[in-house]
Image (cartoon, rainbow, N blue to C red):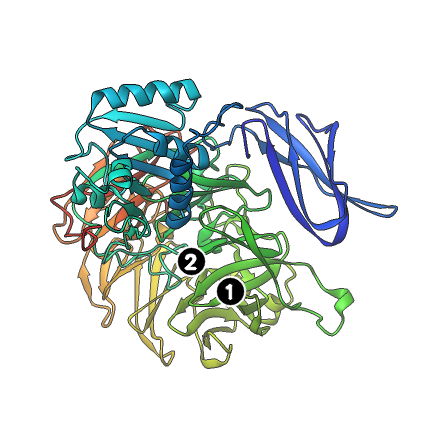
Amino acid sequence: MTAPDTAEITWSSSQPVIGSIDYGSDETVTRTAAETQASSVHRIRLSDLAPAGTYHFRLRESLRDENVTSETFTFDSTFEYNLPALPANASGTGDAEAADAARKMLELSSWRSGYALILGIEDGNLAHELAIQSNLHVVVVEPHEERVAALRQSLASAGIYGSRISVHHGSLARLPYADYFANLVTSETTWRTGQFAGSQDEARRVVRPGGGAVFLDGGNFWNPFRRPELPGSGRWTHQYGEADNSSCSKDDLVGGTMEVLWWGRPGPRPMPDRGGRNPSPLSVAGFVYTQGDRILFGQDAYNGTIYWSAMLPRVRRSNIPRDCSNMAAADDRLYVIEGDHCLSFDPRTGDIVGCFTIPLPTVNSSDPGNQPPLDWGYVGYIGDVLIGTGIPARGTYVADSGEWYEDYQPDQIDKIAANVVFALDRHTGELLWQRRHGVAVQSTLTVAGDKLFLVDSQNPAALNNPHARKPHEQLAQNQHLISLDIRTGKVDWEQSIDLRECEFMTYMAFAQDRLIISGTNKAKAFHHYVVDATTGKLMWTHHEATKKTHHSGHLDHMVVVGDKIYSNLQVFDLETGQMTRQPYQERRGCGVMAGSNRMMFFRDHFHSMWDLDSDERWEIPGIRSGCWLGIVPAGGIVLAPESSSGCSCTHSIQTSVGFRPTAAARPNDEAGSAP
């Protein structure tokens, strides 16, 4: 949605055609919007929409006398997250110097959305121009009451006060704002006079880590200070932390008691039901990415600003214990699977800047006319290498009918397995290699260093099964644990492995040159296998009944923190398998834990946290996450996008929240020298 009454729909075609869209508020789709020229990239705007309604649409492509029509899709115009539009007569101040300064500041800072903080004004024209020229919400602080009153009146007359800009009367010495909230900090007084009456320390405190820009140096104003990422902060780039599946962000800052940093959208309305065990949010470089029900959000991790949203009718994934996530995030790109291709998004704008396809068929390759359709299954990356898989089309779980995937039934426990594994250059899309031998269990794909590890089955029954969902009885035969070179696909080693006991699910993670494999059998007993990742040699095993006998305890995914494995309410030494703690305190909720180097996060009755150093636990009453992994520690903070939608349990608040350690709980995380 580009405005409350306007949607922009984009798609691509294999050749230039004239595109059009039939749409309407019911399935009769009586309205049409069309292009006038043929193109292979289509972008059509639908206007005059009701601001809160469900619309149906079909894509049509016309080439000469041929017409191709898509299936019917839907979108909801309620999901519009833009700043209020500028009034039709809105204009700049007429101050050419202020207009040029605002333009230059936006270009140098690279921020056009989020929050701008102006510490001290002269006439307020710079604040006005920043609001007019960008999608920033501008906050002004000014100690002189008469200047505050004059600017408020001017902005109200221009129709932008309150919606685009706020003016606060207060001291510049101590600011009443949360840490990290501003993307851009400046002072009109400093720009005009070269002087700054405020606190440089306060400016550092409130600016966003990971690229927040500060223009406060009177002697070198146009050389902004850029706040780096917080030293010791971690990343959550894949479903279970990084591509190693350890469910640990390696963040050294997150620990101790927490306080709310921000809260708000998205709320429960655009989210899928919590019971489907949906993909986790991701966070890297100060952004957080959340999947709703076929809608994707790109937000600022430090202030919650929704930079962009995209409704994607074919982007849906559930039952993650038997599959994998459909997205991965790098500093410069977000990768999202849609059907048979993988989209590459710009983190700040949400623009689609790349589209990758599955490189080659996996079956009957000698007869191109007899290829079964494939969807893209797994996406992950390390460095410049993008890893993908191809699975039989339309085989993933989508949980559109309230599924919970709890019981030992084929339609709940069949695992998604891939016919082809491949690697691309993630910038150019160049094919590096592909492997078409065996079927790879997607929940086991693990990337660490320059290696890709996976479990596959070379059982003919699994190989010949035309479906993506394959029964355990097929996959458990002729199984192999394999290490591949990430850049060449060359097999480093391959070992037969017996994972017949991993019936409910099969997980794999990497830490400190060890592969950890876990799963439960039909009797809900846990089985752990730890393997030397350099040779494939089995180092130790552990087999024991599930300790948590309710709320999906038998589906628990391990967390690896340093040399400790947290699984099945027990803690194991990674190297020896010796149990160092049994059991740790039980939790009630259906989800699984996520860790930083100092703390665990999970759903109990509510959002819950466990400090590993002090052994203390805290809850945030009234708010909870969903039925899989919904709380991630990254960037020195904790992010919990709304994921409890559909839950009927006793909690009253359904919202997205960012937390940060309280001042007493966090190490020094300030960003070096003053701006």
- Name which quarter of the figure residue 206 lies in: top left
Mark 2 in CB contact with mark 1 (< 8 angstroms): yes
Disc 2 to disc 1, how far (Cα)?
A: 10 Å
Q: Is residue 655 visible?
A: no
In the figure, is residue 434 to the left or right of 25? Answer: left
Asked whether 453 or 475 is in front, the reply is: 453
Q: Which residue is mark 2?
A: 330
Identify the residue shown where x is 44% and y is 41%.
Answer: 307
**Residue at horizontal 42 percent and vertical 28 percent from the top:** 93
**Screen quadrant of the N terminus:** top right
- Give residue 622's mark: none
Q: Is residue 122 above or below residue 495?
A: above
Q: Does residue 596 appear in this view?
A: yes
Q: Is residue 441 left or right of residue 237?
A: right
Front position in the image: 271 or 431: 431
Say what secondary structure mark 1 lies in. loop
Q: Residue 97's quadrant in the figure?
A: top left
Residue 426 bears which disc, if any?
Answer: 1
Residue count near mark 2 (Cα–Cα under 10 Å), binned few <14, some 14–19, many ≥20: many
Amino acid type at mark 1: Arg
